[in-house]
Structures are given as structure tokens and as C-alpha cells.
Amino acid sequence: MTQKGSCHCGKIAFEVQGQPGDVIECNCSHCQRKGYLLWFTGRDQVKLLTPEENMATYTFNRHVIQHKFCPTCGCAPFGFGTDPDGNATAAINVRCLESVEIETLKRIPYNGRD
């Protein structure tokens, strides 16, 4: 199944293959402030529909995830990184997917603060 997503203004658009199951609700200083609900998948499952040059990047703490956001509307639809085994991953903010009903997803708390 292909999920379509974007930032608020549409300058960042993408597709991701698959269906989100459980999502991570992290309490780190960044995720909590942004209200992220993250679905982790392989980077190869994400297809950018707009140029990466349209995106700004924010990293913090250990600089493991490149959080991509729109410099126009400020929306942050996903981040790219690597898992502990070195595989390229994508952290999709399910709030930025068009057809996902947030209330149906199981939230898994993650203690990123400590």
C-alpha cells in the first residue's frame, strides 16, 4: 500500500510503501515539542516527489537522525537515519500522511528524554 504525505504547504511531498502499525511517541525535547508520532521503516520505502533541495535539515543531540522540514511552513514530515545495524531508515511523522487515521494507531511510549 502506498501512503502519500506532505508538509502543510506542499513544498515537500513524498510517498511511503507500507501501512503504519504501532507508532512511537517519544518524549525527548524535540519530539515532544513537535508532537511527532513516528513510524520507522526502511529508507528504500520512501520516494521523494519533490527535490531534497526544498528541505531544510535539523539535527540535535547525537546527530543520528536528519530531521527534514519545510523552510516555508515549518512542517516536519520525516527524518532519515540509520538503525543500530547500520541500515538506512526513515522516521515518518504519521501526522503528515493523508490517509492515516491517527486514532486507530497504537502508540508506543519511548523514553527519549533520559
Image (cartoon, rainbow, N blue to C red):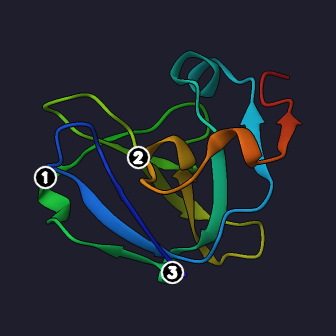
Q: Earlier in the sequence, mark 3 or mark 1?
A: 3
Q: Is the C-beta separation of discs 1 and 2 under 8 Å?
A: no
Dot label at residue 45? 3
As helix, strand or loop, the secondary structure at mark 2 comes to: loop
**Residue at figure coordinates x 77%, y 62% from the top left:** 21
Assess whether mark 1 and mark 3 are in contact (beta carbons under 8 angstroms): no
**Residue holding disc 2:** 77
SS under mark 3: helix
Residue name at image x 32 percent, y 65 percent:
14
Q: Which mark is residue 87?
A: none
Q: Which amino acid, mark 3? A: Gln
Q: Residue at x 42, y 53 (%)?
A: 98
Q: Nearer the viewer, residue 43 or 38?
A: 38
Position of residue 27 relative to residue 12, above or below, is: above
Q: Between marks 1 and 2, how big is the CA–CA gap?
A: 13 Å
Circle 1: residue type: Asn
Q: How many marks?
A: 3
